[in-house]
Image (cartoon, rainbow, N blue to C red):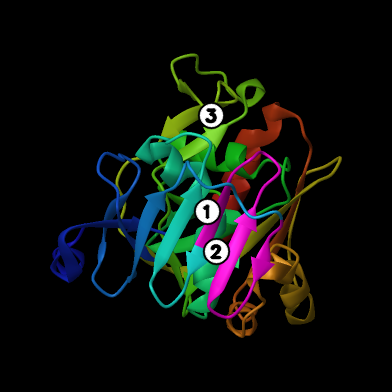
Amino acid sequence: MTNAKIAQTLNNAQGAYGLRLDGLSTSLLVSPVPASWTRVTLTQDPDTSPAERSTYSDDAIDLSYESGWGVSLRRKTGTMTFQVRRRVPDDELVHPLLAPAAMHFAAWLGHAAFHGGAFVRDGRAFGVLAERSHGKSTTLARLAVSGIPVLVDDALVVDNGTALAGPRCIDLRPEAVSDDSLESVRGDGRRRLRLPPIEPSYPLGGVFVLRWDHRLSIDSLAPSERLIALARHCRPEVGRTPALLELSRLPVWRVQRPRDPACLDDVCDRLLEAALT
C-alpha cells in the first residue's frame, strides 16, 4: 500500500467489498481498509435456523439458501448474522458466504454491485463480468498466475466509479485446475488460489463481459448497449442503482471466446491489450 493509503487506514481495520469487518479474528483473506469504509459486525448463530424464504426491506434483509444457511442484515445497526449449521472458520465466512450479503449492503450504500471480478492494469481496475460457469474465475486466475494483480473475484462493488477490493483468493472448480498444489476448500469442491495483498480501491477503467462462442472476438459496445449489458450482471434484488448510469459511460467490451482452455492465454492477452487503449 502507498503511504497515502496507509494514512487512511485504521489500526487493525480489515475488510472487503467496501466494508470494514468487525468480528473476525483469524481470516487471512481480508486486507487493511480505509477508515471511510462502512463498519459492519459479523456474527455466527448456529442455534437459529435461516428464514423460510428471503425477505427484503429498506432496513432489514433476511437471506435464505437451499444449501441450508442464511444471513440476516440490519442496516441501522450495521450487522450481519449468519445462520449456519455449525460454526465455520473466518476464512469460510469471508469467502464465499460474505459476497451475497455484501452486495446488499452495497445497494443500501448506493453502490453498484455485480456478479463479477476485476483485475488491475496501469493503475486502473477493469471489471470482468460473466454468468455462472462462463469462465470468469478461471480467466482471473490465469491473469493472477501471470502476474497481473486481481482486485476481486465473485462480487464487484463500485463506489463512485471506484472498484473495491475483495477477499484475497479465487476458488476454482477442480476440473479447471492444473496445479495440484492448490489447497482444497469448500468440502473439496473448490481449489483455492491465494492472492497477494492489494490496495483497497482503484478507479474503474472499463468492463469486460464474457460469453462463450466458437471464435475469439472482443467488441466495444455502443453507449446504447452498455447499460443493458451491465444490468444483466446486477442482481435484481440488490437494486439497479443510479450508479449503473454512471458506469455505462465507461468502455464496455463484449468478449466472445471458445471454451477450449488452450485459448485462455490468447483471451487474457486480448483483455490486457484492450485495457491499454
Q: Residue at x 56, y 18 (%)?
A: 178
Q: Which of these two is toward me, 122 or 64?
A: 64
**Callout 1: 10 Å neighbours few (<14), some, many (20+)?**
many
| Residue range highlighted in magenta | 53-72
The quadrant where residue 88 appears: top left
Residue 26 position in % (x across, y down): 26, 39
Q: Earlier in the sequence, mark 3 or mark 1?
A: 1
Answer with left or right where residue 200 lies relative to residue 121: left
Q: Is residue 60 magenta?
A: yes
Q: CA distance from mark 1 to mark 2?
A: 6 Å
Q: Nearer the viewer, residue 171 or 205?
A: 171
Which numbered marker is on residue 99?
1
Specify the label residue 186 is tagged with: 3
Q: Is residue 276 in view from this perspective?
A: no
Name the residue beneath numbered marker 2: 103
- Left or right relative to 250: residue 135: right
